[in-house]
Amino acid sequence: MTWQTHTVFNQPTPLNHGNLYLSDAALCEAVVREGAGWDSGLLASIGQRLGDAGSLELGRLANAHPPELLRYDAQGQRLDDVRFHPAWHQLMQGLFANRVHNLPWETTARDGSFVARAARFVLHAQVEAGSLCPVTMTFAATPLLLKMLPAPFLDWLTPLRGDRYDSRLLSGGQKRGLLIGMGMTEKQGGSDVFSNTTRAERLEEGVYRLVGHKWFFSVPQSDAHLVLAQAAGGLSCFFVPRLLPDGQRNAVRLERLKDKLGNRSNASAEAEFPGAIGWLLGEEGEGVRHILQMGGMTRFDCALGSHGMMRRAFSIALYHAHRRQAFGKPLVEQPMMRQTLSRMALQLEGQTALLFRLARAWERQHQPQEALWARLFTPVAKFGVCKSGMPFVAEAMETLGGIGYCEESELPRLYREMPVNSIWEGSGNIMCLDVLRVLGRQPGARALLCETFAQVKGQNRRFDRAVSQLQRWLRKPEEAQGREITGLLYRLACGEQMLRYASPPVAQAWCQMMPGERGDAPLDGQVQSALLQRAAGEV
């Protein structure tokens, strides 16, 4: 006999269809507002492809089958290679085809390309975040290399601007696309790179022998790495190719791959340099200056990546709440759940507005005020967005209940992934120290804040009081207040954008979250409806 114990019902099917771009009203508006409306059609196409079941399955497979280190071949020869699941390579092909690694550095780049690239990054982050690590480092290193690539590698200039992912072990000039990694931190120092002990011995003009190690050697399969090492003139930046100009492997030894909490699809290695050959970029002692230039862009990508994952977690939660019945009506109509989801949607609205204003500032680095805006608000955004990602995804899990705690829901992977962006490229305290450094040392930084917030003065008394609080703190800022100052700057920067561009009720709702106010006060019912409709792509 066949026994039927129960019928499965009231279980929403997985969210594996839909357009990741067109369903996000705040993102669509920000792209147009910040100068990349010309890319809307392609972004819609990318959003459709990334939102289907096939793309989402690639993300799952790449994390279920992490990379493997191949130190030796069968004959005992050193390989120092990394083997990836085919899903990883397909994800990388998509990223390169969409030029997430180099769109603004094209010779024919259009105005707004930095904004367009940020939108593409956010969309890809919703599918798989580990593959964004090599793309981020390549993106940040490319402008430096376009200016000072060592002479033996000038044939790399064309593939640096290519749109093809090429995983073959070949000299860079023979490839259709390149990956550039970074090797900065060491066991004894971490963020304190001045304590690095890797030594660089000059062999001839511009060429050095490196002896030392790196504790986190990101994307070890890269065609080259930018490596910090101590030269006679101080901490310097070196171009260390995987293959030397004669085709021989460079002396870069991969000791092991990191066993990480998240970011499982991406390979992070521990490496040693028993006499690796590197080419000096710039002058000796300029290493930190070069790293800071690249670090700003990678920090911005950390914030974009966290935002994209938060958007995906929210989409899963909202989709579930619309289709799950609880106590006689859809979960989304239950008052407390509706309030929770509305506040999550509001948080995403503010983040989107700030991040794409920041993308425009990066776009216009040739303008001193925009360059200063990017310099100040990049660590602010990284601190504010990345710190909020972990509790945000946990809240999305609670919306689904027990099934949200199971791997099939995607949410556990997103939750494990969240801390890396808060740690990588400088943890929260490092971001706050950087903000204090800019405010204390950059001429015009405080005047820029006054000018920025003055444009919306008088629109909301809570916002105005928070600006006054910030000004009091900045009269004599103390390092111990770094987190409070940076957190307030983040909320004010989002609020300024919301007051300028969001509907008045939604903007006022954001300002309700200012310090000293009742941030937990319920949102108005009409505001809830507007936020949830926009988040679901219904307007």
Image (cartoon, rainbow, N blue to C red):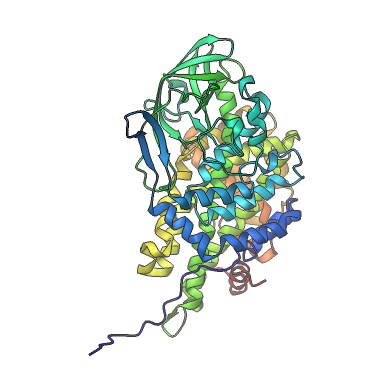
Up-down relation of residue 362 to residue 309 (above or below): above
Q: Where residue 132 appears, x then y in whole percent?
A: 53, 46
Name the residue: 47% across, 53% down.
87
Farthest front residue?
A: 75
Up-down relation of residue 121 to residue 521 (above or below): above
Quarter of the figure that contains the C terminus: bottom right
Q: Where residue 345 appears, x then y in whole percent?
A: 56, 63
Q: Where on the picture, by quarter, is residue 396?
A: bottom left
Name the residue: 52% across, 60% down.
55
Q: Where residue 1 appears, x then y in whole percent?
A: 22, 90
Residue 282 visible in image: yes
Pick the residue in front: 184 or 500: 184
Q: Where on the picture, by quarter, is residue 529?
A: bottom right
Farthest bottom residue?
A: 1
Residue 520 visible in image: no
Name the residue: 56% across, 58% down.
347
Q: Where on the picture, by quarter, is residue 452?
A: top right
